[in-house]
Amino acid sequence: MNPLLAPFQYEFMIQALLVGALVGAVCAILSCFLVLKGWSLMGDAVSHAVLPGIVLAYLIGLPLAVGAFFSGLLCATATGFIKDHSRVKEDTAMGIVFTGLFAFGLVLFTKIETDVHLNHILFGSLLGISTEDMIQTAIVAGITLVVVLLWRKDLLLFCFDPGHARSIGLNTKRLYYILLSLLAATVVASLQAVGIILVIAMLITPGCTAYLLTDRFHHMLGIATGSAVLSCLSGVYISYFLNGSTAGCIVLFQSMLFVLAMIFAPKHGLLVQHFLKAEKSAS
Amino acid sequence: MSRSTDPISHNPTLRLDVHDVSVIYNNGHVALRDATFHLQSGTICALVGVNGSGKSTLFKAIMGFVTPTHGKVRIAGETVQAVQKKNWVAYVPQSEEVDWSFPVSVWDVVLMGRYGYMNFLRIPSAADKQIAAESLKRVGMYDYRQRQIGELSGGQKKRVFLARALAQHGRIILLDEPFTGVDAKTEEAIITLLRELRQEGHIVLVSTHNLGSVPEFCDQVVLINRTVLAYGPTREVFTEKNLSHAFGGVLRHFKIDHTDQPGKAKHEMVMISDDERPLFLDTDEENEKKG
């Protein structure tokens, strides 16, 4: 047997590749909106804030995803409340809320016996994912994909020019909560598979890479998805040979694609910018 | 939904009534107090005041982004919320408000003006595309429709957002500082277009610092400083006394005495300027001229 094909003889590897690609695609599509809206930090915050929700959901016997979802939403609404009712700015308010919620989750975790491993939530367990988790991830990811693609034009307008959106009677408050819920759902869908740390990377990097490579939104969606899926597949595959952290390999591959895009992008890349400058100063 | 290309003719009684509007923000800041003015169909009105005088608050109240703490805004007798659904109020933002590196083309932006007429998936119909194309042609930007919006000059950027307002078939068009960063030729083109819109019965409300060009194309003026100080026909309202009142000591004032000139017994002019184009007022003849 060809040693390069060795990973594919294990079912857990195939599963990891599939789930990784699906999660990567959903995160990538959402990351395009987050990057354009300037919400990258929001992904970070929501990802951390889901922790107490997970523990509490376990305690009451709800699906962990439900607890995580509402905990994530709570983070965003609490941030909004603090911003509106004090002189604290939004990014600061977000920092206070999500670290507080995360800490609350940590304390709960140490006090309550759960069958969830903290390590799995932080760093994921793509290779050890259960069928049940896989189905849950696929369902949430599927719903998120459909909603974001159906609403993409309104969401894009909301990111680009909320003033115009409002003036033509679009409900921008609803769009805000749709985008927020999509974000929370994506975090939930990805959490079991890839962990909080990786979700943050997957919610930011693919959109950024694509943003450097194109000036058209629909291309951006495609490039981001492509780069994320490629990173997930390559990351999982490489991690088999390195026998290293799967999540780490995925993020590293993604970061590498970003660096390449930053240097070689056809219009916004460093090289092209450098030559353009040289040309200008020469003429 | 009506896809009429001439929404004005069906409603000849377009009016904008701002009645006793006060806006107090959450932090207690009184942005506007008891502001009242009325505009009728077929007018270009300048909204003139210093920074922080409440110009943008007034715009927000007319667009329904802030709810007046007191008083009301009515458009053709209806509430702002009712009017939003009809796409009647179109807004042309200041250049600084727009993210020019956003991955959208000129064509995408103008089609956004049609979103209110499209179905939930925002798939443009043939009519939407035709209206968008006509709007772009009207501002002379059709050939640039494939460009990303950041690849345009200052004047071109302005014209694209004007085209969006046209595509929206807005009946009340709000322009925020339309002449900043715009060359003289584009300024002329924009003014010509605004005059056409007035001819068609629109209400055009222009917030501007550019005092010099106000008498040239605005038939009405609203002077504001936390409240409406004066409003009415330009000739009556746009006077040295009122402007001094509106701007306090901010403006630069020069009195130019032409008394020495042969053939003139006593002739005095006043030049008023903030940092943009100065305004010349001929105090003897009450005849305003562009500088």
Image (cartoon, coloured by chain):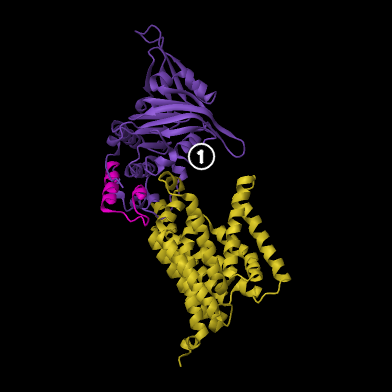
Chain colours: A yellow, B purple
Q: Residue at x 29, y 50 (%)?
A: B128
B225 is higher (above) or lower (below) than B5:
above
Image location of residue A48, percent across then percent down: 62, 64
Q: Is residue B123 magenta?
A: yes
Q: Which is nearer the eye, B136 or B115?
A: B115
Q: Residue at x 54, y 78 (%)?
A: A132
Quarter of the rendering containing residue B168: top left
Q: Is residue B174 left or right of residue A192?
A: left
Chain under disc 1: B
Magenta segment range? B112-139
Callout 1 environment at 10 Å: few (<14), some (14 to 19), or many (20+)?
Answer: some
The amino acid on which the numbered mark 1 sits, given as a three-letter code, is Val
In the structure shown, which secondary structural element does the residue marked by tag 1 occupy? Answer: loop
Image location of residue B53, percent across then percent down: 52, 31
Q: Is residue B85 left or right of residue B131?
A: right
Q: Residue at x 51, y 72 (%)?
A: A137
The residue identified by callout 1 is B66
**Is residue B203 in sight in this rendering?**
yes
Q: Residue furthest top?
A: B265
Magenta part, dominant SS:
helix
